Amino acid sequence: MNDQLPIAGAGQQLKRNVAYKLLVGSILSGKQNFEEERLRNIEVNGKNVVRVNLIANVVDKFIQEGGEKKYGSLTLDDATGQIRVKLFGEDVSKFEELNQGDTVLVVGLIKFWSNEIYIAPEIMKKKDPAFLLVRKLEVEAEAPQTLDSGKIAQLKDKILTMVKEAEKDGGIDIDKIILELKEPPEIINNEIKKLLEDGVAYEPRPGKLRYLG
């Protein structure tokens, strides 16, 4: 399995590791693979994970203003475990809008220091607490799930209706579709893929759908 997605940059094709959607407990229990003393990746369900995409609640916030080096951390909890997100220097300012009790989406690199697994964040975004359930469904629906052809047709119509109705608002987030329809995420994503392939909808940016007709 290819664990990387290509991204363009500076006139050349670079490689960027996939940010796998995981629960905190899976990150903490993954097999840690080191290269000398540096964490290379963690192994989770046969995948070599370098970057993660998780949704969790902020249960603690710490900012160290004094000293030679400014430091900040958020402790995240998604009911499967707790993990810290750490920033240093001027980057600590990125924590300003986040506080205890917020639900956040974090995309970042898995790091290891002083016997602790933590996340060096690349993206942090507040989310509605309901998205904790969306993520749980996405991650835990490991066994293949199917619907009969009649229900699949109904599901496709519902998705298309939601996309059309959201056009006045500039589109709809795929996460919102998953949350509202309450069907297995992989089945919803498969029907969305078909809409994209058929040219009925398009993604102006990853995770956002708009209607083409």
Image (spheres, grey):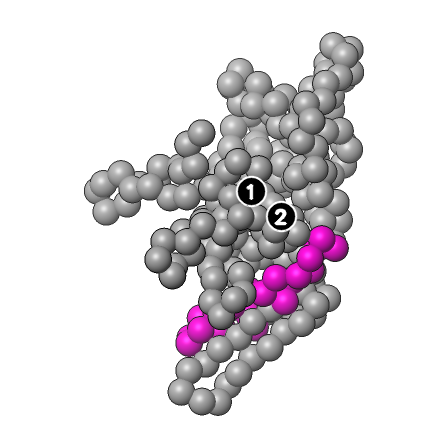
Q: Examine the image and state in which quarter residue 182 appears.
A: top right
Q: Is residue 54 covered in magenta?
A: no
Magenta span of residues: 75-96
Q: Please state, as top left, top right, bottom left or bottom right, where the C terminus lies in the image.
A: top right
Residue at x 72%, y 29% (from the top left corner): 184
Image check: 93 left or right of 130?
left
Q: Label 2 amino acid?
A: Ser
Image check: 78 left or right of 51?
right
Image spot of residue 162 (x, y percent): 70, 30
Residue at x 70%, y 68% (from the top left corner): 59
Image spot of residue 193 (x, y percent): 56, 23
The residue under label 2 is 26
Callout 2 environment at 10 Å: few (<14), some (14 to 19), or many (20+)? some
Callout 1 environment at 10 Å: few (<14), some (14 to 19), or many (20+)? some
Q: Is residue 82 covered in magenta?
A: yes
Q: Please state, as top left, top right, bottom left or bottom right, where the N terminus lies in the image.
A: top left
Residue at x 42%, y 76% (from the top left corner): 89
Image spot of residue 119 (x, y percent): 51, 60
> Mark number for residue 44?
1
Q: Earlier in the sequence, mark 1 or mark 2?
A: 2
For the residues labelled 1 and 2, say whether their Cβ atoms are less than 8 Å apart: yes
Residue found at the far left of this picture: 11
Which one is in front, 206 or 109? Answer: 109
Image spot of residue 68 (x, y percent): 40, 87
Which one is in front, 112 or 193? Answer: 112
Q: Examine the image and state in which quarter residue 106 appears.
A: bottom right
Image check: 101 left or right of 91?
right
Residue found at the far front of this picture: 36
Position of 206 relative to 83 (above/below): above
Instruction: Label 2: state its secondary structure.
Output: helix
Residue at x 45%, y 50% (from the top left corner): 33
Residue found at the far bottom of this picture: 66
